Image (cartoon, rainbow, N blue to C red):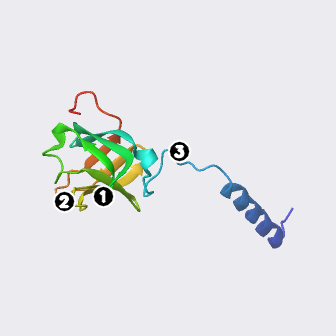
Amino acid sequence: MIMKPWLVCCAAIAALAVLSRAPSAQSADHEASVPLSPSEAAGAWSLESAGRDICVVTLGKTHVGAGYAAKVGAGCAGALPGDPVAWKPTADGMQLVGADGRTVIGFGRWSNSLLVSHQASGVDIQLKRGAARDVAH
C-alpha cells in the first residue's frame, strides 16, 4: 500500500500536535532565569563557595528601603564583596544590596533552590535553600 503525499503530511502534523502536548522532561524545580519573588525567597539560604558552606543568609519578605530585608550571618564577612542589608529581585534572579542601595553581588536563578554568582576568579558563589548545620547564622 502506497500512502498519498497529503496523507503523510497530515499524519506528520497530527504527530507533532500530540508531541507538543506531552509533558516537559524538565523537572518542576527548573526556574532558571525567572525572577525570584519575596514569598519564594523568604527563609534561610546557605552561602557556599569552592564546595564548602560559609555562612547563612536569611532573605525576608518585609519591604525595607532598598528592597526586602536580608540578614547576613557572622561568617559571611569575608565571603561577600560588601555588607548587604537587603535583597531585590532582578529579571533573572536577585541581588544583595548595601545600605546605600547599591548592588553588593548579583545571583542568577538556576532553580527554586539554587542561586549562582559567577566571579571573575572562576570560583562561583552559590546560595542554596536551607541552612547548613555547621555554618554561622
Where disc 2 sits, the SS reads loop
- Quadrant for the C terminus, please: top left
The amino acid marked with disc number 3 is Ala
Q: Which mark is residue 120?
A: 2
Residue hosting label 3: 28
Is tag 3's residue or tag 2's residue first in the polypeptide sequence?
3
Measured as percent of width and height from the top left, residue 25 is found at 56, 48
Residue hosting label 1: 66
Separation of residues labelled 2 and 1 (CA atoms): 26 Å
Is tag 3's residue or tag 1's residue first in the polypeptide sequence?
3
- Between residues 17 and 5, which one lies in front from this camera angle? 17
Nearer to us of marks 2 and 1 is 1
Separation of residues labelled 3 and 1 (CA atoms): 31 Å
Separation of residues labelled 3 and 2 (CA atoms): 31 Å
Circle 3 packing at 10 Å, graded few (<14), some (14-19), many (20+), is few
Is tag 2's residue or tag 1's residue first in the polypeptide sequence?
1
- Residue at screen point 78% across, 63% down: 11
The amino acid marked with disc number 1 is Ala
Measured as percent of width and height from the top left, residue 16 is found at 70, 61
Measured as percent of width and height from the top left, residue 58 is found at 31, 41
The amino acid marked with disc number 2 is Ala
- Between residues 92 and 38, which one lies in front from this camera angle? 38
Q: Is residue 135 left or right of residue 114?
A: left
- Between residues 8 and 120, which one lies in front from this camera angle? 120
Where disc 3 sits, the SS reads loop
Residue 110 vertical position relative to residue 130 in the rendered view, above or below: below
State if disc 1 and disc 2 touch (CB < 8 Å): no
State if disc 2 and disc 3 touch (CB < 8 Å): no
Q: Is residue 104 left or right of residue 9?
A: left
